[in-house]
Image (cartoon, coloured by chain):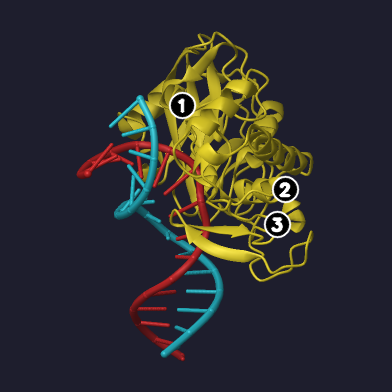
Chain colours: A yellow, B cyan, C red
Amino acid sequence: MPELPEVETVRDGLERHVVGRRVAGVEVRRPASIRRHLGGAADLTGRLVGREFTAAARRGKFLWLPLGPDGDDALLAHLGMSGQLLVRADPSEGGDHRHLRVRLFLDDGGTLDFVDQRTFGHLAVVDLEPTVDGRPGGAGSPAALVPSPAAHIARDLLDPALDRDALTRALRRKRTVVKRALLDQTLMSGVGNIYADEGLWRAQVHPEHPTPDLSVEQAHRVLDGVTAVMREALRQGGTSFDALYVNVNGASGYFDRSLVVYGQGGRACPRCGAPVVRSTFMNRSSHFCPVCQPLPSS
DNA sequence: ACCGGTCCCTGTTAGC
DNA sequence: TGCTAACAGGGACCGG
């Protein structure tokens, strides 16, 4: 499932392979994949054809490609849990992907294909608006602009413009439990179920540790743990599961081999040997070591 | 304003 | 073998 490292891998691929190219046509095969674009397929097509992709930007799990020449709007993409953006040089070679939802024809004969099996992802053309702090909108963003539908999303843990001390304070002010806070995209963005579990294991903090009870040191450890695991995943090209996620050119990441707790229920904790516990929480599964990550005694 | 619960959606897999 | 149910989960949305 694409979280920050995977989306950043896609962003990097788009920057290298799509920026500078122009849209020649749009084919929407599944209207639900553009459900967030008010105006439908015709309007989406009208706002894309003839426009040039001038950059590839990202904040958390939101990706956008600013459109030239004006650069005050952008193609916004969210990959959801199974979305892929595949660059193809010649779509007539080989068959279309089974879950091809939207195809953008580029002016040099290639395509940018949006493929999404589970359909939580979407594309839209949206206006950009100024960031509240005047800093660049996110990774790869050349301007202090952010897509309107992503303006409520907080900066992510790898963003140089992130105020880490303010985030630590905000985290401890929350009246919830730490894993829920990690997944709250308005507090910090980019963290999903996988990296939340891995980061909490590193920090030796229980997923249901109440946020107000986190010491400053624990809060730092949690943020550092999540940041570190995402950086390592990014270096390895993102996590991949059963080929659902592939990067912009179709190459799978391989960080899944390095996962310590996620999906490892019953396996021995590499730190202490106790069996990793899998529990259900927030309609999601949580994985943690009950010995290394004890709940605080209240 | 903040918080927690629900639902959306589809393909795969486990279990009877 | 064939069916059903569980499962995967980001984020919009809504009620308290």
Q: Looking at the picture, how far across and down is residue A177, in whole percent?
A: 50, 45
Q: Earlier in the sequence, mark 2 or mark 1?
A: 1
Residue position marked by numbered label 2 in the rendering: A202
Quadrant in which residue A129 is drawn: top left
Residue at 79% in and 61% down? A270
Q: Residue at label 3?
A: A292
- Chain bearing tag 2 is A
Q: How far separated are the C-alphas under marks 2 and 3?
A: 9 Å
Percent coordinates x, y for residue A78 in the rendering? 50, 37
Which tag is nearer the camera, tag 2 or tag 1? Answer: 2
Does the CB distance between marks 1 and 3 fall below 8 Å?
no
- Mark 1 falls on what kind of element? helix
Same-chain status of marks 1 and 3: yes
Could you classify mark 2 by the number of other residues whose Cα lies within 10 Å: few (under 14), some (14-19), or many (20 or more)?
many
Q: Amino acid at mark 3?
A: Cys
Between marks 2 and 1, how big is the CA–CA gap?
Answer: 29 Å
Tell me: A235 left or right of A131: right
Chain identifier of the residue bearing label 3 in the image: A
Q: Helix or strand or loop: what does disc 2 sit on?
A: helix
Q: Secondary structure at mark 3?
A: loop
Residue visible at 60% across and 52% down in the picture: A206
Task: Please give the residue where the numbered disc 1 appears in the rendered image.
Answer: A150
Residue A164's place in the image compared with B4, above or below, is above
Q: Earlier in the sequence, mark 1 or mark 3?
A: 1
Identify the disc placed on residue A206. none
- Left or right, A8 with respect to A122, comes to right
Q: Are circles 2 and 3 on residues that touch, CB within 8 Å?
A: no
Distance between the alpha carbons at the discs numbered 1 and 3? 36 Å
* Residue A58 drawn at (x, y percent): 59, 27
Q: Nearer the viewer, mark 1 or mark 3?
A: 3
Callout 2 amino acid:
Arg
Q: Pointer 2 and pointer 1: residues touching (CB < 8 Å)?
A: no
